[in-house]
Image (tube, rainbow, N blue to C red):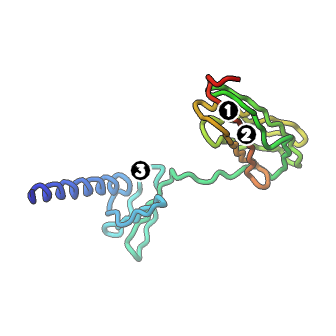
Amino acid sequence: MNENIKDYLLYGVAALTLINSYFVFTQSGSGRVIETPSNGTALVESRGGDAQSINEPSISKSFDSQSGRTEVKNGNQQQPQKPSGPPTNVAFNEMEFDFGTIKQNSENVHVFKFINTGPNPLIIQDAKGSCGCTVPKYPKQPVAPGEEGEIEVVYKPGTQRGQQTKTVTLTANTQPDKTVLKITAMVEPEDADS
């Protein structure tokens, strides 16, 4: 029994060593990982104080000659998307819409209309639904000052039931840069009596 535990521990140490070696040699080229915080940065102790370049385009590293450590950063982390273009203003006819009572597995469409009330073209960089059941379509081209535009929201509740509230978050060159539209619905089973 004691021998089996010893074997399992040796296998575990070997597996961890292999994983560590793989990370160090594929990501940093040399050294050993001495710390990996949750922010996606690993501190690597460099051998001989020589910082070698990383072939991965999504990884960057910097060398601290005093500590002999190299900081490796994963460039694939999500950075907050910054709106482009000079700021402008937008006014929606409505910010919320209630579909009322709808059936499961139905497709429900509503169009939110807006006007660019500011002095610069409105650039909507992104529109995201709060879940996969809520899909927005938005203008990909700038909307000139004084022009109108539309955000089409398609809500497919699938098997959801009861009162539902979903949102669509727009990111644009407005102040603030996020605008939230809301839809609500009471979802009934498909076989429920009308």
Residue depicted at x 75% and y 33%: 99
Q: Nearer the viewer, residue 114 or 106?
A: 106
Give x and y (percent) for residue 156: 64, 30
**Mark 3 / mark 1, whichever is N-terminal:** 3
Residue depicted at x 73% and y 39%: 183
Query: Alpha-carbon distance for marks 2 and 3?
Result: 46 Å
Q: Residue 86 carries which label?
A: none
Query: Alpha-carbon distance for marks 2 and 1?
Result: 9 Å
Taking the image as drawn, is residue 126 in sight? Answer: no
Residue to which mark 2 is pinned: 183
Q: What element carries label 1?
A: strand
Q: Nearer the viewer, residue 52 or 192?
A: 192
Q: Which mark is residue 155?
A: 1
Q: In which quarter of the image is the N terminus?
A: bottom left
Residue 109, compared with residue 178, is above or below; it is above
What amino acid does circle 1 point to?
A: Tyr
**Mark 2 / mark 1, whichever is N-terminal:** 1
What amino acid does circle 2 point to?
A: Ile
Q: Which of 27 and 169 is in front in this view?
A: 169
Residue to which mark 3 is pinned: 55
